[in-house]
Image: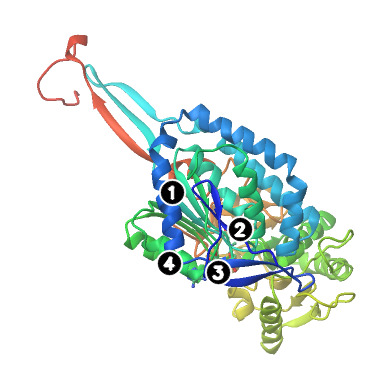
C-alpha cells in the first residue's frame, strides 16, 4: 500500500510513527493509499524550512518569481489529465468535471504570473512642497493554507501561486480525505527547481491545523472548509496575531422568475444542484420559484433529473459520481428523511440509485413544497439534493435568500434587466449568477462570499489575493539638495 509523505525543505520525507489513515476511492470503496497524520513537530519542520527560505526568495526579482509561474503553468498543462484522474479517484466527481477543476487550478497560476503588474504600489509626488509619498507592497512572511475535500486540485491553488509569487514562503495542509492530488501537484512543483523551502506540504488532520494556528513562525492563514471550523480558525489565528481569511460553508439559492427561458434554466439548475454530487461550495441547493415559474420549470427539472446516470466518475456517460464517503451518504439520507418528516414532498428520491453497488452513492433528489422554516433550508446538506420553495413575488424570493445565515452564491434566472438590477442591489450574498448556475468567479476576480460563508476581509484570489499576501509600507521623503525646504513637514493649503 502506498504511504504518502510530506514535502519539506525541497525533499520528500516520511513521517515515522504517524498514525496512518486510509484514502478511499468513493466510487468503489477501495483503499488507494494511506495518509500520515503528522504531529506538531512535523509542521514545525516545514515552518522552519519556510522561514529559512524566506529572505532569499523575497529578494528574487518579481519577474523572476513570475517566470516560475510560467513554468509551473506549462508543467500543469502537460499533466492535466493525470491531475484530473487523481481528483476523480479520490474525490469522486466525474472526469470532465475534474478536468474543468484542473483548468481553474491552472488559471490561478496564470493570474499569479501577472504579479509584476498586480503587486505594484502607488506614489504621489509633492504631497507637500518637495515631499513625495509612496506605498510599496512586501510579502507577509510564511503563509499556511488548510484545504477541504471537495476541490482537491483547485482550492489549494487559490493560495499557493499568489502567496509565492508575492514573495512569501508557503505551507499547505491538504484535506486528509483527498491528499493524492496535491502530492502529485508537489511532484510537479518539485521539478521546477524552486529554492528548497519555498513550498512545503504537511499531511494530516486536526493536530496539524491546531499547530498552524498556534505556531509563532506562521504569519498568515488561509482556510477553506465547513462553517464551524472556519470560525475556530478565524478566532484562533486572530488570537495569535496572524492575518487570516476563513471561507466557510454555504447554502445557495437559485431564484427562477416567470420569464426565465426554460431549457437553459433547467440545465443550469441540474448542473448546479447535481454536478460534483452537490458538493461544491457554489452548488445551488434551494430553488425559489416566483409566481408561475414553478409550473413552467419544475416538472421538466424532475423529468430531466430522473434521467441522470449515477456511477463511477471515471466511466464515460456518468453524470453524477459518488459523495465523498459512506458517512456523508448516510448524513445526506438523514436530511432527506428529516425534510419528509417536516412535510416536504419527495418528488425525486435518489437514495437507492440504479446500477451501482459498492461506493458511497446517492442520486439526484428533489423535495417540493418546502417552506422557509424547515431545517433543510437553513442547514448545509452538501449532497445532490434540491429543495423547492414557492414565492409569489421577487421581493418574497429576496427575503427568503436573505434569511439564510450563509451568503456565498446565489443565481437568478430571468431575461429582465430590471429584476436583475433589483436583485443584485438587495441580496445579501457575495457572488451572483445571472442565468448561470455556478457563478464561481474566475481567478482574476475575488471569491467574494459573505456572512457565515466568509470570515475575514480580503477574499481568495483576484486583487484580494495579492492584498492578502502582501503588506503595505509607506515612505514619505524629501531631499534638501533637490530644493526641498527644511523645517516641519506639513501639508500646505
Ligand atoms: P472540513 O471543515 O471538515 O475540513 C476542512 C479542513 O479543516 C480539513 O483540512 C480538515 O483536516 C480540517 N479540520 C476538520 N475539522 C477540524 C477541526 N475540528 N479542527 C481543526 N481542523 C479541522 O470541511 P470539508 O468537509 O473538508 O469540506 C466541505 C466544506 O467546505 C463545506 O462546508 C463547503 O461548503 C466548504 N467549502 C467552502 C468553500 C467556500 O468558498 N466558502 C469552498 C469549498 C468548500
Q: Distance between the residues labelled 3 and 2?
A: 11 Å
Q: Distance between the residues labelled 4 and 1?
A: 19 Å
Residue positioned 39% across, 35% down in the render: 137
Q: Which of marks 4 and 1 is nearer the N terminus?
A: 1
Q: Nearer the viewer, mark 1 or mark 3?
A: 1
Reply above or below: 472 against 424.
above
Residues packed near mark 3 inside 10 Å, few (<14), some (14 to 19) or many (20 plus): many
Q: In which quarter of the image is the N terminus?
A: bottom right
Q: Distance between the residues labelled 1 and 3?
A: 43 Å
Query: Extreme left residue here?
Result: 487
Residues packed near mark 4 inside 10 Å, few (<14), some (14 to 19) or many (20 plus): some
Reply above or below: 66 against 358.
above
Please state the horizontal and vertical placement of residue 287, each as a whole percent of the image: 70, 67
**Side of 311 where 50 appears, left or right:** left
The answer to whether residue 363 of the structure is visible from this angle is: yes
Q: Nearer the viewer, mark 4 or mark 1?
A: 1
Dot 2 beta carbon under 8 Å from ligand 1? no
Tag of residue 49:
1
* Circle 4 residue: 210
Query: Extreme front residue here?
Result: 16
Q: Nearer the viewer, residue 459 or 329?
A: 329
Please state the horizontal and vertical placement of residue 182, each as a whole percent of the image: 62, 54
Please state the horizontal and vertical placement of residue 147, each as a whole percent of the image: 56, 59
* Circle 2 residue: 409
SS under mark 4: helix
Residues packed near mark 2 inside 10 Å, few (<14), some (14 to 19) or many (20 plus): many
The answer to whether residue 117 of the structure is visible from this angle is: no
Q: Distance between the residues labelled 3 and 4?
A: 29 Å
Q: Which of marks 2 and 4 is nearer the N terminus?
A: 4
Q: Which of 471 and 287 is in front in this view?
A: 471
Dot 4 beta carbon under 8 Å from ligand 1? yes
Amino acid at each position: 500500500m502506498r504511504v504518502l509523505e510530506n514535502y519539506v525543505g525541497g525533499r520528500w520525507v516520511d513521517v515515522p510513527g504517524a498514525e496512518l489513515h486510509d484514502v478511499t476511492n468513493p466510487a468503489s470503496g477501495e483503499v488507494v493509499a494511506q495518509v500520515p497524520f503528522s504531529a506538531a513537530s512535523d509542521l514545525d519542520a516545514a515552518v522552519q524550512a519556510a522561514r529559512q527560505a524566506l529572505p532569499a526568495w523575497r529578494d528574487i526579482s518579481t519577474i523572476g518569481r513570475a517566470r516560475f509561474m510560467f513554468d509551473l503553468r506549462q508543467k500543469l498543462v502537460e499533466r492535466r489529465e493525470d491531475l484530473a484522474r487523481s481528483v476523480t479517484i479520490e474525490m469522486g466527481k466525474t472526469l470532465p468535471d475534474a478536468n474543468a477543476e484542473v483548468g481553474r487550478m491552472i488559471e490561478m497560476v496564470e493570474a499569479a504570473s501577472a504579479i509584476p503588474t498586480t503587486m505594484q504600489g502607488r506614489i504621489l509626488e509633492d504631497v507637500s512642497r518637495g515631499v513625495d509619498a509612496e506605498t510599496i507592497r512586501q510579502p507577509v512572511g510564511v503563509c499556511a493554507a488548510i484545504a477541504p475535500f471537495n476541490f482537491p486540485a483547485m482550492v489549494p491553488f487559490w493560495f499557493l501561486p499568489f502567496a509565492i509569487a508575492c514573495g512569501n514562503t508557503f505551507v499547505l495542509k491538504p484535506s486528509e480525505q483527498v491528499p493524492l492530488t496535491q502530492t502529485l501537484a508537489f511532484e510537479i512543483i518539485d521539478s521546477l527547481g524552486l529554492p528548497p523551502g519555498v513550498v512545503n506540504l504537511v499531511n494530516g488532520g486536526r493536530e496539524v491545523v491546531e499547530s498552524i494556528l498556534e505556531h509563532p513562525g506562521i504569519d498568515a492563514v488561509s482556510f477553506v472548509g465547513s462553517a464551524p471550523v472556519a470560525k475556530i480558525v478565524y478566532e484562533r489565528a486572530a488570537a495569535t496575531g496572524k492575518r487570516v481569511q476563513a471561507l466557510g460553508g454555504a447554502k445557495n439559492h437559485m431564484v427562477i422568475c416567470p420569464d426565465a427561458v426554460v431549457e437553459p434554466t433547467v440545465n443550469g439548475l441540474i448542473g448546479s444542484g447535481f454536478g460534483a454530487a452537490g458538493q461544491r461550495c457554489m452548488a445551488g441547493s434551494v430553488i425559489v420559484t416566483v409566481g408561475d415559474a414553478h409550473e413552467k420549470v419544475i416538472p421538466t427539472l424532475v423529468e430531466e433529473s430522473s434521467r441522470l446516470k449515477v456511477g463511477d466518475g471515471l466511466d464515460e456517460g456518468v453524470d453524477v459520481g459518488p459523495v465523498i464517503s459512506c458517512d456523508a451518504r448516510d448524513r445526506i439520507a438523514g436530511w432527506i428523511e428529516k425534510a419528509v418528516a417536516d412535510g416536504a414532498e419527495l418528488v425525486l428520491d435518489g437514495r437507492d440509485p440504479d446500477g451501482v453497488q459498492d461506493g458511497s452513492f446517492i442520486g439526484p433528489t428533489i423535495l417540493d413544497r418546502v417552506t422557509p422554516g424547515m431545517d433543510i433550508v437553513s442547514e448545509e446538506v452538501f449532497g445532490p439534493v434540491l429543495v423547492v420553495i414557492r414565492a409569489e413575488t421577487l421581493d418574497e424570493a429576496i427575503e427568503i435568500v436573505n434569511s439564510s445565515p450563509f451568503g456565498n452564491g446565489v443565481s437568478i434566472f430571468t431575461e429582465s434587466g430590471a429584476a436583475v438590477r433589483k436583485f443584485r442591489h438587495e441580496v445579501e450574498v457575495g457572488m451572483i449568477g445571472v442565468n448561470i448556475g455556478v457563478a464561481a468567479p474566475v481567478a482574476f476576480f475575488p471569491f467574494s462570499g459573505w456572512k457565515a460563508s466568509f470570515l475575514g476581509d480580503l477574499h481568495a484570489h483576484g486583487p484580494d489575493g495579492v492584498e492578502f499576501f502582501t503588506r503595505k509600507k509607506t515612505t514619505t521623503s524629501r531631499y534638501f539638495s533637490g530644493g526641498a525646504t527644511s523645517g516641519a513637514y506639513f501639508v500646505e493649503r
